Image: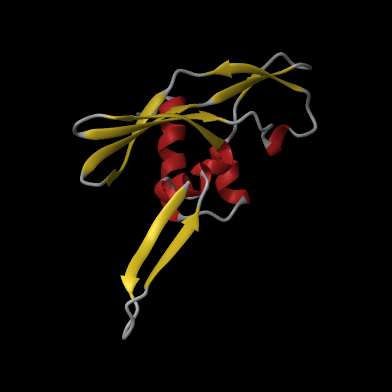
Amino acid sequence: MLLHLDQSKKLGSSKKTACFVVMNENELFSILLPEGMIDYFEIIKVEKQPDSYTIHLSERNIIPALYKHDKLLSKGFYEPVTIQDFPLRGKACYLKVKRRRWQNETTGIIVMRDWNVVAKGTRMTEEFASFLKALNRYHSGKL
């Protein structure tokens, strides 16, 4: 993706200068989404409605650090949850998030990433930590 940033006359010259920045989709979405989202979630699609945007995200198949010594088998996803994010261009913005689940092949127990552990083990913005707390509440039944 090529973003045009500036095309203006140089002072005292008739020459125009153009400044371009090359960004891939993940770099662009990393600016729009809570910091750290691109590390754990893949963008599936973006829907543009007259009054809102909905960004569909799916958790990547990255084994949680808590279970790095266990053999986990991906067992699909939980039902997606919708979380309202900051507005974009004057329209509401919703993140429709599908969290992954894994089955521990030794114990047979279904596990998911513990966002409280992620928050403690990494540097993240307050915004991303708040997002993770909201996501965790959806799946723990506290909302």
Residue furthest to the front in view is 14
On screen, residue 56 above or below 25: above
Q: Quadrant of residue 123?
A: bottom right
Residue at image point 32% right, 77% down: 14
Please, is residue 142 above or below residue 75 in the view? below
Q: Image check: 25 left or right of 89?
A: right
Check the image and tell me how it is coloured: secondary structure
Residue 76 coordinates in the image, percent (x, y): 58, 16
Q: Nearer the viewer, residue 40 or 120?
A: 40
Q: Report whether 44 appears left or right of 83.
A: right
- Is residue 109 among the parts visible in the rendering? yes
Q: Determine if residue 129 is in view.
A: no
Q: Quadrant of the C terminus?
A: top left
Indicate left or right for 105 with 56 as reference: right
Q: Residue at x 52, y 26 (%)?
A: 99
User: Quarter-wise, where is residue 131 in the image?
Assistant: top left
Residue drawn at (60%, 32%) of the image: 113
Q: Residue at x 46, y 33 (%)?
A: 136
Residue 74 in the image: x percent, y percent? 66, 19
Q: Position of residue 81 (x, y in %)?
A: 40, 25
